[in-house]
Amino acid sequence: MNFEVIFFFFIAVSAVVSAILMITQRNPIKSVLFLIVNFFCLALIYLILHAQFIAIIQILVYAGAIMVLFLFVIMLLNLGDESRLTEKMNFKKTIAYVLSGIVLLEIMIGLGLPLGYGFSSMHPRAVEIGTVESIGKSLYTEFILPFEITSLLLLAAIVGVIVLAKKKFQ
Amino acid sequence: MNFNLTEIPLNYYLALSAIMFSIGVVGVLTRRNAIIVFMCIELMLNSVNLTLVAFSAFHGNATGQILVFFVMAVAAAEAAVGLAIIIALFRNKMTVNIDEINIMKW
């Protein structure tokens, strides 16, 4: 048990705890803040995995842009706590927990988790493939068509958001 | 000091990702606030991203990280459109509780 493993476990436990706090908070604003904590923990894990570009994009896009959008919408709608609807459905909740446990078990089996695939150390090229240079090179040569289609997707999203969220004509 | 953090096996990352995905499933199934359900979907997307990055680093193949880039682009578009739908719903029904939004229910 050396420093790296202890650091990894610290980050992993804080990611899981912030995710649990995220789904148990009554107040949506607190949920958003715990989700941001979770995203920062994930960015640190990406750094441990030598994926520098993904870590930076995680903080910029997820924690910076998407979560600000969520906060903005919650404050725009001025939502209160959802206290009155959570007590009455214990039976459905039990079914939900059982189903989630089954999902967890299935994922564990699907990934072969008790034994795993036997990868105990990273590939020697792991440091160089995570850099901006490597990602950008393959993004602009090998994956140029999906990259351009992404711009079309974002354009469609912009137009769709304006159509959906604008006021109706009288 | 050695900064080459290669001591952690792949299974740890996969287990963390599986646990986070299951927490997202619990949130989607138990919460009734549409925005929080939406945030749980983001959490599930992120746990799958973690799996992709972990496999990419352990296989020495950059394609997984490219896929994570595209997943993030789609997630940004999805978040914007979904929040616009929630705003439109709130304008019509004055609620974001998904038990009360049943106009599409047969």
Image (tube, grey):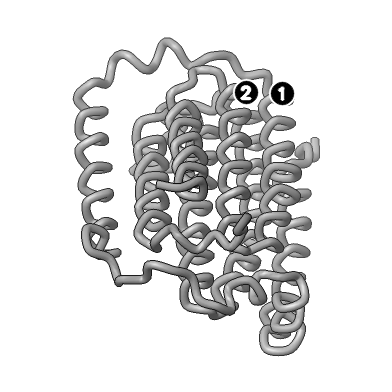
Q: Quadrant of residue A126?
A: bottom right
Q: Is residue B65 left or right of residue A65?
A: left
**Location of mark 1 (residue):** A75
Q: Please give the name of the residue rendered at 72% of the width and 51% of the height, measured from the top-left corner.
A: A61
Q: Quadrant of residue A158?
A: bottom right
Local crowd at mark 1 within 10 Å, few (<14), some, or many (≥20)? Answer: few
Judging depth in this view, the residue of B95 and B8 nearest the camera is B8
* Residue B19 spot, x, y in % from top left: 36, 45
Subunit of mark 1? A
Q: Are marks 2 and 1 in contact (CB under 8 Å)?
A: yes
Front disc: 2 or 1: 2
> Where is B2 relative to B35, above or below?
below
What is the spatial separation of the Cα atoms under label 2 and label 1, in whole angstroms?
8 Å
* Residue at the outermost front position: B1
Q: Please give the name of the residue rendered at 35% of the width and 52% of the height, measured from the top-left corner.
A: B15
What SS does tag 2 mark?
Answer: helix
Q: Is residue A103 left or right of residue A38?
A: left
Q: Quadrant of residue A136?
A: bottom right
* Residue at the outermost bottom position: A142
Amino acid type shown at disc 1: Met
- Among the two numbered marks 2 and 1 on one chain, the one whose residue lies closer to the N terminus: 2
* Residue A160 spot, x, y in % from top left: 72, 55
